Image (cartoon, coloured by chain):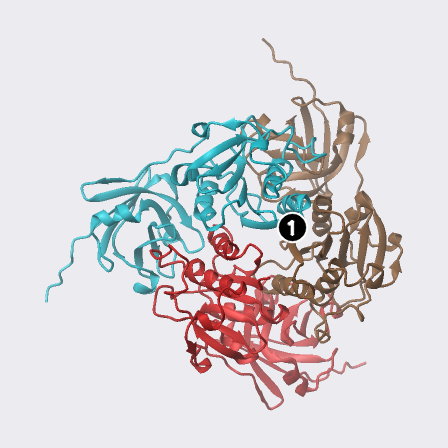
Chain colours: A red, B brown, C cyan
Amino acid sequence: MPSAIVFQSDFGLVDGAVSAMHGVAYSQDTEMKIYDLTHEIPQYDIWEASYRLIQTVEYWPEGTVFVSVVDPGVGSSRRSIAVRTSSGRYIITPDNGTLTHIKRMLGIEEARIINESSNHLPHSELSYTFHGRDVYAYVGARLAANQISFEEIGEKAEVDSIIELPVVDPVFEHNTIEGTIDVLDVRFGSLWTNIPHDLFAQLSIAQGERVEVSIRNDTRFVYQNIVTYAKSFADVRAGESLVYINSLQNMAVAINQGSFAKAYNIGTGTSWRIKLKKAPRIIYEN
Amino acid sequence: MPSAIVFQSDFGLVDGAVSAMHGVAYSQDTEMKIYDLTHEIPQYDIWEASYRLIQTVEYWPEGTVFVSVVDPGVGSSRRSIAVRTSSGRYIITPDNGTLTHIKRMLGIEEARIINESSNHLPHSELSYTFHGRDVYAYVGARLAANQISFEEIGEKAEVDSIIELPVVDPVFEHNTIEGTIDVLDVRFGSLWTNIPHDLFAQLSIAQGERVEVSIRNDTRFVYQNIVTYAKSFADVRAGESLVYINSLQNMAVAINQGSFAKAYNIGTGTSWRIKLKKAPRIIYEN
Amino acid sequence: MPSAIVFQSDFGLVDGAVSAMHGVAYSQDTEMKIYDLTHEIPQYDIWEASYRLIQTVEYWPEGTVFVSVVDPGVGSSRRSIAVRTSSGRYIITPDNGTLTHIKRMLGIEEARIINESSNHLPHSELSYTFHGRDVYAYVGARLAANQISFEEIGEKAEVDSIIELPVVDPVFEHNTIEGTIDVLDVRFGSLWTNIPHDLFAQLSIAQGERVEVSIRNDTRFVYQNIVTYAKSFADVRAGESLVYINSLQNMAVAINQGSFAKAYNIGTGTSWRIKLKKAPRIIYEN
């Protein structure tokens, strides 16, 4: 029985591109289990592609093959690679930074450079713009269906050589943690930071206590306020802000039933810095 | 063989949340058949979640497990429940009104309160914001895969205790039916009312005859005009309005190849009232 | 084992319509493999439905059943048909032009008129507005599951009688090719023309050489400029325009990492004409 294959891209769902990839996969083995991570990655946004993989791959069983196609360099000399994570999942992708989070946070056990001359959908030689269909879906499906081994994909590559996007690590200093805003929970407008919950724990803030949150970008201070550290949205009032542990077990900031990102025009990336510190206790005069 | 599992949520498809739920389901049984109802429920819109379930569940076979996660109260004391409908489908959802239409129109045979301490994805204890993945997908998949019985989900709850949103029943009086605009056929801009076709039949209007349609909301009259009662869109001209029986066999109002909702700024909910009555016959002078 | 069934429509994914079709298909055979081409065809846009089919069907194996429901005439006397392509795929659709490209470019081997009285989801007689669910999904699934033969769908129709939308063929004259802009690669804003790469080859333009591109519609000249003919996007700078061979092996025009369609307000259809000719070589004075 073939393993599951899970597709991700920046193609959107309005045309036939995703279905052509599904068809190529299904044609390799009609028992193929085909799923989609998302096809709504913003165009060319390699960072977000990387983030959505780390958000998802561990919830699929060992042996699952992920095919991620966010590929601004299609047709250039960028390498196409296949990797096995240290937890036994496979990812097929252009080597352009899409593996940044997987490499850093989960670990890559082995990498192979896709030999495109031996691993290419038959009769697709003329088209140089749709490697998602002609190379990645094809190779991924053949791997998932055990028609080729991981080794047959191509020559070994050094894991160190896999391209990483620049990442800024969170810093703990003077009872303050500074991190970056990595990504938005788009639909709900929450900010997801790169600050792990166990680093935050060093601030010794209990649930129900208050956090001073400051946000700045390259050019200005964007936000500074005192926010409740809550176990979940329901612990604060509708419209109230909260700091919480998100589903990746990093610190996040939100407005209950509102959009923090829209309310304060927050963006993402390494220029968006967020500081968390314990807020002074407020004593109300009687 | 596992039953099908069908997911619904307000998460959208732009990030990894839906795929994480799929992965949790697939990990319970790699023969799992995983489908999606929709993930584009407007955020926190329990009413629409309820409506999309009644629109769909009966088209899936007995034993199908639906997992619906529109959950503004995640982390609060709201109950998580599993129900078996009187037609033998299962629905897993927060008990927040999502079952309103199912309970009233289809009937619930039995309800169980999910025991979250025994039914929780292993190693997900720290996160309190993603019960869709950690509880609902997990329980739903285990039920679909026959790894737990319905009874093992948790203690029995009284069907009467399941939360319902307020619903206004249609009223027949003085040869007029007054109902509410329950939901839009979003893409085509049609209004779907809560007036069943057999109540409408009591107005004795034949297909091809004309209906007086009046629409008002809390604050004003929105629309009043004479519209043809047609079997289908093709019976009126492009751009012409019609009253028809929709695919749920309730009365609906549309513009053929246009959007009635956009044309007249129509909303939905119990404050949006619609009246239908037989229009006087028009006699043209010669 | 049932064949795969692949759905396309203009219903969008925000409500329960697509899931009801999936449920009808799954109910015929719980081993059914259900996929989606796209449900984001612009409402009533038969041309685009036709184009997305030709873009996709050949990537699925023989025997695959496509169900395409873009149906402005639902409820009218328009025929419902099932066809077998000359390559052995099946398509179920209203006969309204949806098969234009398939008929012209791939070929139709045999057509059958769906006998709706014998091929209708049981108990769906009252609704006349959702043939996608009540007729097309039902017939398609029964065919995919081998519960009915192609012949049992209904009487044979002459292939010649299948409705085609007007198509303008590309013309080669005076060292210039004039074609139409058939469709957009929506997400990336590229123009896909109806000019095949082998017709373009007669202009004897080598990769890296330059093409004069002119675009006009009914009312005005829209664009005229010199553009590089490139193998792929990576061969030009970010922000530079290019002419290339798309994944259907026709000529296309794009801006690398930009949107050509948005930049110049380009539309699609037979009134949008594009001319390609070899550009004079530019000699820079020293």
Q: Is residue B285 visible?
A: yes
Quarter of the image for the C terminus of chain C: give it: bottom left
> Label 1 amino acid?
Glu
User: What chain is tagged by disc 1?
Assistant: C
How many labels sit on residues? 1
Left or right of A195, for residue A285: right
Q: Is residue C248 above or below residue B118?
A: above
Which quarter of the picture shows residue B251? Answer: top right
Residue bearing mark 1: C31
> Considering depth in this image, is A165 or A269 the residue closer to the camera?
A165
Image coordinates of residue B52 in percent, x first then y, are: 69, 48
Residue C182, percent across and down? 38, 43
Name the residue at the top extreme. B286
The local crowd at label 1, few if under 14, some if 14 to 19, many if 20 or more residues have their Cα within 10 Å, is some
Location of residue C9 in the rendering, given as x and y in whole percent from the top left corner: 55, 43
The location of residue A135, given as percent across then percent down, is: 43, 62
Residue closest to the eye, A271 or C13 = C13
Task: Using the rendered view, name the quadrant where residue C239 is placed.
Answer: bottom left
Note whether B81 is above or below A169 in the view shown.
Answer: above
Quarter residue B189 falls in:
top right
Which residue is drawn at the image coordinates 57% and 62% (left, top)? A2
